[in-house]
Image (cartoon, grey):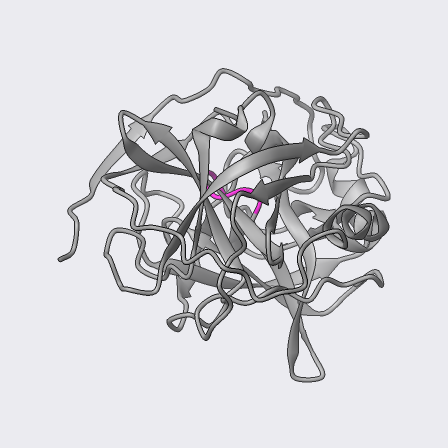
């Protein structure tokens, strides 16, 4: 039986990074957002991105969606560091195999978390090295709905890629759609991206940029994947990190953690994961609330 869902716009954290500056020739950007939802996208085909994960915060017995993630090993999910900064593992569960978030589709795995490892190089002011690994208590069961992502270890400097997440397809709407969204975005060189963001925040070698048109990411689903189709296979090259608070500004790209820059660090942790297909089927979780995380980290 499908569970009902309550949509709400609430504040679940107080972390907020403010910066300002006149960007020429693009509009003024007064601040940046730490979290992202897909904006000006479209519904994804069911289970077409089986490595997509959701991070759920336990609130009054409910699993509250607060960030996205990427299954990178049987028992590890990759996400943005700002998503889990200050959050204890016991408060978090990971959802896998979801497409319509507010319905029990019979494909979901809801798994508890045993440990959260934030990058030792993470800078909360500049969002540099904005990544973390979430260790699952039990390994995921791999099937048609849950698969491990291919991570890119070579920098992707251009071309069209796709970003996914649960969020509104309209930047003017405050509520989030429960259906997984996808949007095609163009990868921009770091040099061009740095020119645009130079008066706001630095673009480091641990970052990459995409989405110079009105499609891209916005508030609500940080930590999700930026992936590119290579030789018929999806390869994850970025983790949704930050961007303009006014979502969908033409000419202003969103910023992602660059997988190739942190690949060795990720593999040094996840390579210790089990090579089996997992023995955890997860469990059905009560999910009655999706929260739009305005301020980042809960």
Q: Is residue 91 above or below residue 213?
A: above
Residue 88 in the image: x percent, y percent? 53, 24
Type of secondary structure dominating the magenta stretch:
loop
Asked whether the viewer can see residue 278, the reply is yes
Quarter of the image for residue 42 reads bottom left
As rendered, which of 195 and 170 lies closer to the eye?
170
Residue 221 lies within the magenta run: yes
- Numbered label tally: 0
Residue 139 lies within the magenta run: no
As rendered, which of 113 and 13 lies closer to the eye?
113
In this picture, residue 272 sits left or right of residue 93? right
Residue 33 in the image: x percent, y percent? 56, 32
Q: Is residue 200 above or below residue 44?
A: above
Q: Is residue 182 above or below residue 297?
A: below
Asked whether the viewer can see residue 190, the reply is no
As rendered, which of 116 and 114 lies closer to the eye?
114
Residue at position x 25%, y 51% from top? 102
Residue 182 in the image: x percent, y percent? 47, 63
Residue at position x 20%, y 43% from top? 5
Give the extent of the magenta segment: 218-223
In this picture, residue 122 sits left or right of residue 218? right
Residue 160 in the image: x percent, y percent? 66, 69
In this picture, residue 180 sits left or right of residue 279? left
The image quadrant where one finds the N terminus is bottom left
Task: Give the farthest residue toward the bottom.
Answer: 232
As rendered, which of 288 and 227 lies closer to the eye?
288
Residue at position x 59%, y 26% from top? 31
């Amino acid at each position: 039986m499908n569970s009902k869902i309550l949509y709400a716009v609430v504040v679940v954290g107080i972390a907020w990074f403010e910066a300002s500056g006149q960007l020429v020739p693009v509009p003024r950007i007064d601040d940046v957002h730490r979290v992202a939802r897909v904006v000006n996208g479209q519904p994804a085909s069911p289970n077409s991105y089986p490595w997509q994960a959701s991070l759920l915060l336990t609130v009054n017995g409910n699993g509250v969606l607060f960030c996205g993630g990427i299954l990178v090993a049987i028992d590890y999910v990759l996400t943005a560091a700002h998503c889990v900064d200050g959050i204890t593992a016991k408060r978090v569960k990971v959802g896998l195999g979801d497409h319509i978030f507010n319905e029990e589709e019979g494909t979901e795995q809801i798994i508890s978390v045993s440990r959260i490892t934030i990058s030792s190089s993470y800078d909360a002011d500049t969002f540099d090295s904005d990544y973390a690994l979430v260790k699952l208590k039990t390994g995921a069961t791999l099937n048609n709905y849950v698969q491990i992502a291919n991570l890119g270890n070579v920098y992707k400097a251009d071309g069209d890629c796709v970003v996914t997440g649960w969020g509104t397809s309209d930047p003017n709407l405050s509520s989030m759609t429960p259906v997984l969204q996808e949007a095609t975005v163009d990868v921009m060189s770091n040099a061009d991206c740095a020119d645009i963001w130079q008066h706001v925040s630095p673009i480091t070698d641990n970052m990459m940029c995409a989405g110079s048109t009105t499609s891209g990411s916005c508030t609500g689903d940080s930590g999700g994947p930026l992936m590119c189709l290579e030789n018929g296979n999806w390869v994850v090259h970025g983790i949704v990190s930050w961007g303009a608070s006014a979502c969908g500004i033409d000419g202003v790209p969103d910023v992602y953690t660059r997988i190739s820059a942190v690949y060795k660090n990720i593999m040094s942790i996840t390579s210790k994961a089990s090579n089996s297909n997992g023995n955890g089927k997860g469990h059905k979780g009560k999910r009655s609330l999706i929260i739009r995380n305005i301020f980042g980290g809960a």
